[in-house]
Every structure is written in structure tokens, then in C-alpha cells.
Amino acid sequence: MCMTTLPLTTTLADVSRIALGCMGLGGEWHAASYGEADRIQAQRCIEVALEEGINFFDHADIYRNGKAELIFGEVLKSRPQLREQIYIQSKCGIRFADDHGPNRYDFSYQHIIDSVDRSLQRLGCDYLDILLLHRPDPLMEPEEVARAFDALLSAGKVRYFGVSNMNHQQIRFLQQYLDEPLVTNQIELNLAHRDFIETGVTVNDDQGRHAHFSEGTLEYCQRQNLQIQAWSPLAKGIFAQAPNNPTIAAAQERLTEYSQQFDCAIETILLAWLMRHPAGIQPVIGTTNEQRIRDCAKAVEIELSREQWYQLLTDIRGRNLP
């Protein structure tokens, strides 16, 4: 049966089952600023999300080079009461190429502290509900991360912490150094990019013989009551375009069939497929299209049967399960 609550509700009691990703807000990536049309778009996206019951907003310090947080902060400034009605999550750890080096990751104490301070300044907020480490840093010194987390927690700047794009071994390793439990792991997960699920069905079979993806991550997060968040849950829109291979075409045809059956959009079914998983996956939708936000929000009303879920999996795989 489709879960009606999320693991994250143990820390954020009324958090919405779907999150709005804010990477699309703030104008062009490389523009120095944004305009009035961008402000209107940001305000409408937030308003539509709230109208549809979405109260969780996902950011990162790098999104639009900081402009996503900045424009979101403008909306908050115009509605001061809104901050206490929503949850804000941001990320740090990715550094773009600059005069000091190439694209790189940085989990050093000072970078984490400085990144949070800059995010809070852009957002015009006193605290983040959740801070995620954006991508694994091979040079991570977990003691430094622990020290930064302790400082941010003590200062009231961050309530909870999580990670993004990590497997369960990396999470377990980091957690050993932390006093507070990690609450979130945000990974790319959708019908097309489903390796975390595939590793669970090709165990002890030739179909999985050459797979080298991380096994057991979904199970570990379930066992630890750690929220799985799915970024790119709509698979970057590939199911809304002309199919580029037979398996995409087959899945697209099935999605269309189910969308007609449930009287909803294809996007609704894509999210319902993810949310049918017993891990209680929270999709993070990145669209700025108002109708698509509304279509995605309807996924909480759709419960795919076991047969429908497996049919979509079989279609996209292009062959039967082992």
C-alpha cells in the first residue's frame, strides 16, 4: 500500500510528500542579476506550490550562482509570516571553477560555515530546516564536518542535517562521527534512472552480474528512517518528448494508458510510481511550470497497484524480471 507519511515526519511533523526544487528560480545561470519577470515567476511558483499543499522547498548555494536563494528571499521578505509556514532545505559542498582551482568539492569546516552564512543572508532567514552535503568529497575529513555541524546546530542556524548523492557506506562512515542523526539522502531516482531499485531485483542473477551500482542504499535508508529524496523525478522530461529508443517508447505508451485511466498527467504517474515504493520516497520536482506543479501535486492521490508498478518497470527495462 502506498505510504501516506514520510520518514522525515519524525523530525518535520507536517512536511509535504512532495518538495519543490528551486534550481529553476533566479533567471539565467550566468547572468549577473534577474529581472521583474523572474521575480513574478518565483512568486507564482511558490504560491502555486502552497496552494497544492507543498510546503517543502529545496535549494543549494550554487543554484543560479546564488540567485535562486536570493530571489526566494525576496518573496519571503514580502511575506514575513511565510517562513514559519514552510520548510527550507539547502546544500553546500560544490565549488565551481575559479581563479583558485577547477570544479571541486569542499567539506572543510570553514567552507561549510561560510556557505550556510551566505545562504541565510541571501534567503533573509535566521535558520535552515535542513542542510545537505551536496556531493561526496573524497578529501572529506569527517571530524571537520562534525565540528561544522555542531557549530551550526549550537548557533541555531541549522536544525537538521543530511547528504546528497551518497551510498549507504558513505552515509554510515560519516554518521559514525556525528552526534546528530542524518535525516535525508537526496539521490537521482526516476523511472529511467532507477539503478538503486534495479540492484534489488537482479541479486543472484546474470542480469546483475556486471552491475557495479551501490547495492543496499534504499534498504539502509529505510532501516535508519532516513528520508530518500528523489531529484529529477520526472527524468528530465524524456517521457514527454518523442521517444529515442524502444524502451522509452514502451514506457511512454504505458504512462499514457495509466494517465488516461486515472484522469491525470503523465507526470502524475511518474511520481506515483516513485511514491509507491515502501521507502517513502519524497520527489523533488524542479519545474517552474505552474500546471506541471499542479499535475505533480496530484500524485499524492494516486495509488498504483503492484501489477501496474511492475508493468512500468518491465516496460522500461525492455525485458522481464529475472
Image (spheres, rainbow, N blue to C red):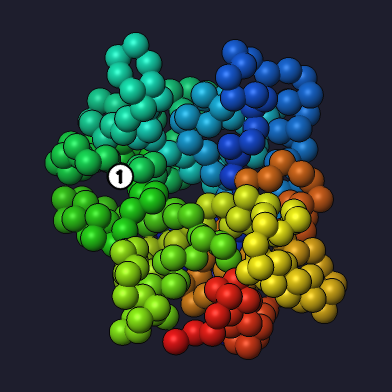
Residue 180: where, in percent of width, then height?
26, 53
Q: Foreground residue, 170 or 123?
A: 170
Q: Foreground residue, 181 or 197?
A: 197
Examine the rendering and report whether any part of residue 122 can be seen. Answer: yes
> Residue at coordinates 31% horizontally, 33% vertically from top-left?
105
Residue 270: where, in percent of width, then height?
66, 65
The answer to whether residue 268 is left or right of residue 275 is: right
Examine the rendering and report whether any part of residue 114 can be seen. Answer: no
Instruction: Please state, as top left, top right, bottom left or bottom right, where the N terminus lies in the image.
Output: bottom right
Residue 222: where, in percent of width, then height?
38, 72
Specify the amino acid type for callout 1: Pro
> Residue at coordinates 65% horizontally, 32% vertically from top-left?
25
The residue indicated by pointer 1 is: 136
The answer to whether residue 188 is left or right of residue 162 is: right
> Residue at coordinates 73% horizontally, 75% vertically from top-left?
254
Q: Quadrant of residue 33?
A: top right
Disc 1 packing (10 Å; few <14; some 14–19; many ≥20): some
Q: Foreground residue, 201 or 180?
A: 201
Is disc 1 placed on a helix, strand or loop? loop
User: Where 234 sits versus 47, above or below?
Assistant: below
**Number of callouts in the render?**
1
> Residue at coordinates 30% horizontally, 44% vertically from top-left?
136
Instruction: Please state, as top left, top right, bottom left or bottom right, where the C terminus lies in the image.
Output: bottom left
User: Where 239 sits versus 205, above or below?
Assistant: above
Which residue ends up furthest to the front in the rendered image? 245
Residue 214: where, in percent of width, then height?
32, 64
The answer to whether residue 70 is left or right of residue 94 is: right
The answer to whether residue 82 is left or right of residue 213 is: right
Q: Quadrant of residue 259?
A: bottom right
